[in-house]
């Protein structure tokens, strides 16, 4: 019987679904890295979220047929090493696209209408109407970087707001809202990032990148933190090039490990009223928790032609 190892907490439907199609499933969320590496050769399949970084060294003695990541990004997997060993790699980008899109729109509306700051003020007895005058999204231009499942889901919803949408994807150009980066730099009022973390996109949002925008922008990042390091974001806030910032991700999400410099940097950014933060939960809804499993199970069954 084919054996599958699950090393992260995933929706219980994963175990049920794999068992129903003939897999023997073992869930071990208590493993250390050394323990995980030592037992991995006994399994044909691996289901993982973010517990371990899967390197070529870890895979050297494995007999895996597939690795399924219960999430969207594959930056914690050495995909080239997997493919060179004939290991199929599955992610579930389709499973949390709706969740991400709604989260991004919630952040955008909060920034545009100052919902986060006005709520705090009213709770503290301040009734300041003029200081909380917002702006409408209608007829504003949003630049969407990355037009995969997430980018398309965001564009689909924002089209109903009467916004002008420009989408740029280097590898899968949009047929719906095609644009060049030059057009986005020139015309965008809002920028939303929906690209994977790769060697090419790491540090993409640099000082020069931000300075290239002709108008002050709202910037939203729900992809990966290292794509938009904090130093360039602070540069943009200081100069007024970034007039609103919403981050669901950070370059270092282990807050307890922050250096004094990281703490100081974040504190200065957070002091700007037009900033919103969330703990990497854009794709983390009750529904997406289940839908991610559905997507992965279908891909695993397709891999075995079940």
Image (cartoon, rainbow, N blue to C red):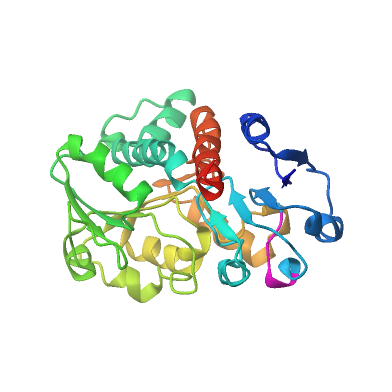
| Residue at 34%, 38% in the rendered image | 105
> Which picture quadrant has residue 156?
top left
| Residue at 52%, 52% in the rendered image | 249
**Residue toward you, 44 or 254:** 44
Q: Position of residue 2 (x, y in %)?
A: 72, 46
Can residue 96 be seen at all in this image of the molecule? no
Q: Is residue 30 magenta?
A: no
Q: Is residue 16 left or right of residue 160?
A: right
Q: Is residue 53 magenta?
A: yes
Q: Position of residue 79 (x, y in %)?
A: 56, 66
Above or below 142: residue 106: above
Can residue 139 be seen at all in this image of the molecule? yes
| Residue at 84%, 55% in the rendered image | 39
Q: Position of residue 190 (x, y in %)?
A: 27, 53
> Which picture quadrant has residue 181?
bottom left
Residue furthest to the bottom in view is 208
Quadrant of the frame with the C terminus? top right
Q: Position of residue 56 (x, y in %)?
A: 68, 71
Q: Kindly report the secondary structure that dominates the magenta region of the rendered protein.
A: loop
Quadrant of the frame with the N terminus? top right
Above or below 108: residue 265: below
Give the magenta range: 52-57
Q: Is residue 122 left or right of residue 79?
A: left
């Amino acid at each position: 019987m084919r054996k599958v190892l699950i090393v992260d907490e995933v929706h219980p439907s994963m175990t049920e679904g794999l068992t129903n199609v003939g897999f023997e499933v073992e869930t071990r969320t208590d493993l250390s890295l050394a323990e995980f590496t030592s037992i991995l050769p006994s399994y044909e399949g691996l289901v993982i979220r973010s517990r371990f970084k899967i390197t070529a060294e870890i895979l050297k003695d494995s007999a895996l047929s597939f690795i399924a990541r219960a999430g969207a990004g594959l930056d914690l997997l050495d995909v080239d090493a997997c493919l060179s060993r004939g290991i199929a790699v599955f992610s579930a980008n389709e499973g949390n696209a709706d969740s991400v899109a709604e989260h991004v729109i919630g952040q955008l509306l909060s920034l545009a209408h100052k919902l986060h700051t006005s709520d705090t003020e009213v709770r503290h007895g301040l009734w300041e109407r003029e200081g909380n005058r917002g702006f409408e999204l209608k007829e504003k231009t949003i630049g969407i970087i990355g037009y995969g499942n997430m980018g398309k889901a965001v564009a689909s919803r924002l089209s109903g707001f009467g916004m002008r949408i420009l989408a740029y994807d280097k590898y899968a150009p949009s047929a719906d809202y095609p644009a060049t980066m030059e057009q986005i730099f020139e015309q965008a009022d809002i920028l939303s990032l929906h690209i994977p973390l790769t060697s090419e996109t790491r540090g993409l949002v640099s000082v020069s990148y931000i300075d290239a925008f002709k108008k002050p922008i709202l910037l939203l990042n729900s992809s990966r933190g290292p794509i938009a390091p904090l130093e360039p974001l602070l540069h943009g806030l200081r100069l007024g090039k970034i007039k609103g910032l919403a981050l669901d991700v950070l370059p270092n999400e282990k807050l307890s490990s922050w250096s004094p410099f990281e703490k100081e940097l974040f504190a200065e950014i957070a002091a700007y009223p037009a900033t919103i933060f969330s703990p990497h939960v854009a794709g983390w809804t009750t529904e997406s928790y289940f839908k991610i499993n559905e997507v992965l199970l279908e891909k695993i069954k397709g891999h075995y032609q079940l």
